[in-house]
Amino acid sequence: MAANVNAHNPGSGKVSDDPVVVGVDFGTLSGRAVVVRVADGTELGTAEHVYAHGVLTDRLPGRGAPLEPETALQHPEDYRRVLREAVPEALRRAGVAPERVVGVGTDFTSCTVLPTTADGTPLCELPDLAERPHAWPKLWRHHAAQPEADEINALAAERGESWLPRYGGRISSEWQFAKALQVLRDDPEVYERTDRWIEGADWIVWRLCGHETRNVATAGYKGIHQDGAWPTKEFLAALDPRFADFAQDKLDHPLFPLGARAGGLTAEAAAWTGLAEGTPVAIGNIDAHVTAATAQTTAPGRMLAIMGTSTCHVMNSEILAEVPGMCGMALGGITPGMWGYEAGQSGVGDIFGWFVDTHVPPAYHEEAAARGVSVHDLLSAKAADAPVGGHGLVALDWHSGNRSVLVDHSLSGVLVGMTLATRPEEVYRALVEATAFGTRTIIDSFTRAGIPVHDLTIGGGMVRNPFVLGIYADVLDRPLRVVDSEHSCAVGAAIHAAVAAGVHPDVHSASAAMGRVRPDTVDPDPGRAAAYDDLFAVYTELHDHFGRGGTDSLHRLRALRHAALTTHPTGEGTR
């Protein structure tokens, strides 16, 4: 087994003949597999495969000129290796024989999209296109298509397109149409050779089953598919005559509900995974959305925030409403039969990691090593007992742009209030608070639009950090339910696999039986919660000033940076 497969067995070690399912979560930097018992959701074994190529932001692997700013690409082979390495290792750790596995489910970061041939071969794997950046999969955090997103938004607003309000009034540069339009503009040959423009969530199921399927969630949230239709040919032609047939030629395919059976494992996929040929495979799903089943938040008004490198906020409702600045809505986009809403923050854990990696002095790293803790844990401990507002700082959490509620990836991070006495742990706390303020802004937007948020559940990697959870509870002034799994996305995929295999009748029933939520909540402190109202008022003032037209300084800085890096991509000619 490859050295970069990390595995552990959280189950009891008891081996039985109970049927199990496998969930596979394809994240930003790694993929993980989990083996789950269908009767009660017990995790029997997990394994993680770290992507060898990671996120390609500077150059293609071993090739070519520097990539343009805001590019984020990935290598499809990294995805296949998750199937070849993490899945068999999770089975081995669980002590589960292949015949006990009754289904496989997957989830994927979104919008991560690939240009492929008609048989699903990624264009970057064609020898004559391997050095063309636009032939490679575009990760969700590829933001170089912001000009195209701006153009789509402006034209849609001018024409009064009915789908635009369902995306909070603006679609994102992360999504399918903006990224495809960028390919058309920047590399028309790659665009012409793209037979299928497909989400990673659907592509990986294609690899498993041997035929193309498409899911309702990625089409609705990332593909502007509303009321059974894509944007019209007339609208697309108005963007660019060559773009008129994009949806019809490269996207259009029957859409399947979440929890449906996509097919069975091919012989090739069975050999990769160590599972039996023909094992049922669930329709693809979005990583954040699939987690609602793990969190038992499939009922209306129960918001789930999946906090990792970024955060997605998803919630079902029986109410159809237009929520300004959210990512979108789709009928059946989280569970069949209800309107699924999505909002999000492009940077959360990424921001904390960036600060630790680039701005924390060596002495802190040495102290953390001496204590046997991470630098994150050290900073959290140093900042935990400080009074609210004692650092005199407020930050804007836009280091990866703003996904909600401004929907503008040209924005950037801001930190105000620093003095010569400011300590690293104070900045760290201000950054954590900024992400909590961002979530509060999103919840307020839903509330004002008439979509009540009854309770909030936290999932994802941040469930491991009690400091972060405590700040969120205080900032939001509400108790937090917490998913009782570090692999909530993979478990959610496994729950959908149980539905696809027919073990549970629907996602709601499977969630009730297999979901994983801690019995205790993280509760706010009334005094700290009241104190945070004053800091949030400052955050909101800065948020509106920099993000709603009080100044265009952040956009000008981004333009200056882009011009400088384009003119001097290697730093030559500068000093």
Image (spheres, grey):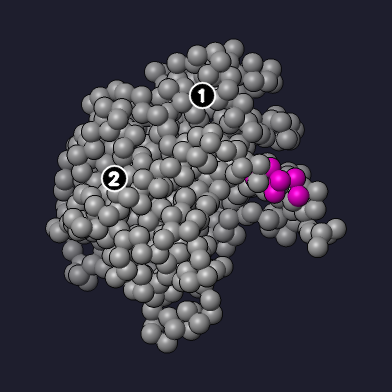
* Residue 120 position (above or below residue 226): below
Answer yes or no: do the residues labelled 2 and 1 have beta carbons within 8 Å? no
Does the magenta-highlighted stretch encompass residue 155?
A: no
Q: Is residue 110 at least partly visible in the picture? A: no
Q: Disc 2 vs disc 1: which is toward the camera? A: 2
Q: Quadrant of the C terminus?
A: bottom right
Mark 1 Cα shell of 10 Å, populated few (<14), some (14-19), many (≥20): some
Q: CA distance from mark 2 to mark 1?
A: 30 Å
Residue sitting nearer the eye, 499 or 376? 376
Q: Which residue is mark 1?
A: 252
- What is the span of residues highlighted in magenta in the rendered image? 558-564
Q: Which residue is mark 2?
A: 304
Amino acid on which the number 1 mark rests in the picture: Asp
Relative side of 430 to 296, left or right:
right
Q: Residue furthest right?
A: 573
Does the magenta-highlighted stretch encompass residue 559?
A: yes
Q: Residue at x 42, y 70 (%)?
A: 425
Q: Residue at x 29, y 70 (%)?
A: 385
Magenta-drawn stretch, dominant element (helix, strand or loop): helix
Relative side of 487 to 401, left or right:
left
Residue sitting nearer the eye, 397 or 465? 397
Q: Residue at x 27, y 55 (%)?
A: 531
